[in-house]
Image (cartoon, helix red, strand yellow):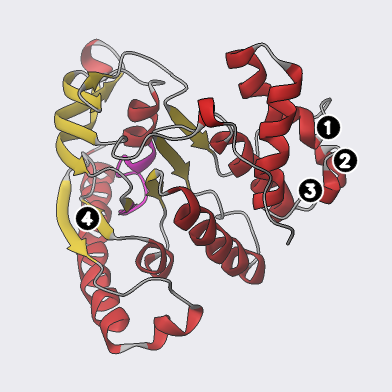
Amino acid sequence: MSPPLPVPTHLAPTPGRGRLQLKDVSIAYGEGAARRTVVERFDLDVEPGEFVCVLGPSGCGKSTVLNAVAGFVPAARGLLEVDGETIQGPGADRGMVFQQATLFPWKSVLENVAFGPLMSTGSTSTAEQTARTFLSLVGLAAFEKHYPSELSGGMQQRVGIARALANYPRVLLMDEPFGALDAQTRAMMQEALLNIWAEFRTTVLFITHDIEEAIFLGDRVVVMSANPGRIVADIRVDIPRPRTPEVQFSETFLAIKRECFAHIRSETLKAFAHQQNATALS
């Protein structure tokens, strides 16, 4: 991989920024009798530059929390802040990467990544310089003229990560970004993400259902309860960085995995029992 191009100084990230705070957050869907609380009394404090992974049983509200931080979903109660500023809607201070790469199919790879910087600076040359910086960083400098349909799933996700980072967001939000990839590509993408994160130390909130992925990537693993979702465990991952795949066989890694598994199994059983009861009463 060739070295990245110089980062435009006016777009460079500011050290110490990107603190994320969620205080007593509850989120509900529907109206009247159909109203349902999905997330309840959710509290989370993420320090600038921290990599936090969120685990939980299916339907616990993991993605809902992420969408609320992104500004896509309003909270019924509570406070959501980035660096003390209340989140009131989507903003360039938060970059989003979805499970499926949401690229513009009619734009080239370079144009996709340059889109955000172009909107914020109005300068095509600056936007393309920034885009090339990040395409080089994710190892796709040679594919800038290609279109999304010409790329593999893993390559498309790398373009998505480059596009999300091209605005130098304070917080990077990732909703199971590697969930649709095969095991080998997923492992390579995890290592690539850690290398990119080590370069910029952007605050990351990463949603996943994969325990091993959460431990390998995160500084902390936050485990959510069955619906309505709230935090039942906040586990520090005391494994030195940089990390290689071999760390997954260490005693520390396996101990954290057992702890996470116990919480997830307990909450999944609760969710299953609740569904059975609801079916019996219907």
Spatial CA span between label 2 and label 4: 49 Å
Q: Earlier in the sequence, mark 2 or mark 4?
A: 2
Q: Earlier in the sequence, mark 1 or mark 3?
A: 1
Amino acid at pointer 3: Ala
For residue 100, say whether it is visible. Answer: no
Q: Earlier in the sequence, mark 4 or mark 3?
A: 3
Secondary structure of the residue carrying tag 1 is loop
Q: Which mark is residue 141?
A: 3
Q: Earlier in the sequence, mark 1 or mark 4?
A: 1
Total marks in image: 4
Spatial CA span between label 2 and label 3: 10 Å
Identify which residue is drawn at 59% across, 43% down: 161
Q: Residues within 10 Å of mark 4 (few under 14, many from 20)?
A: few
Whether tag 1 and tag 2 are in contact, CB under 8 A, the answer is: yes
Q: Residues within 10 Å of mark 3 (few under 14, many from 20)?
A: some
Residue in the foreground of this view, choosing between 274 and 44: 44
Amino acid at pointer 2: His
Spatial CA span between label 1 and label 3: 12 Å
Q: Which residues are magenta?
A: 52-63
Q: Quadrant of the C terminus?
A: top left
Residue tagged 1: 108
Residue tagged 2: 146
Residue in the foreground of this view, choosing between 117 and 57: 117
Residue in the foreground of this view, choosing between 127 and 268: 127
Q: Which mark is residue 273?
A: 4
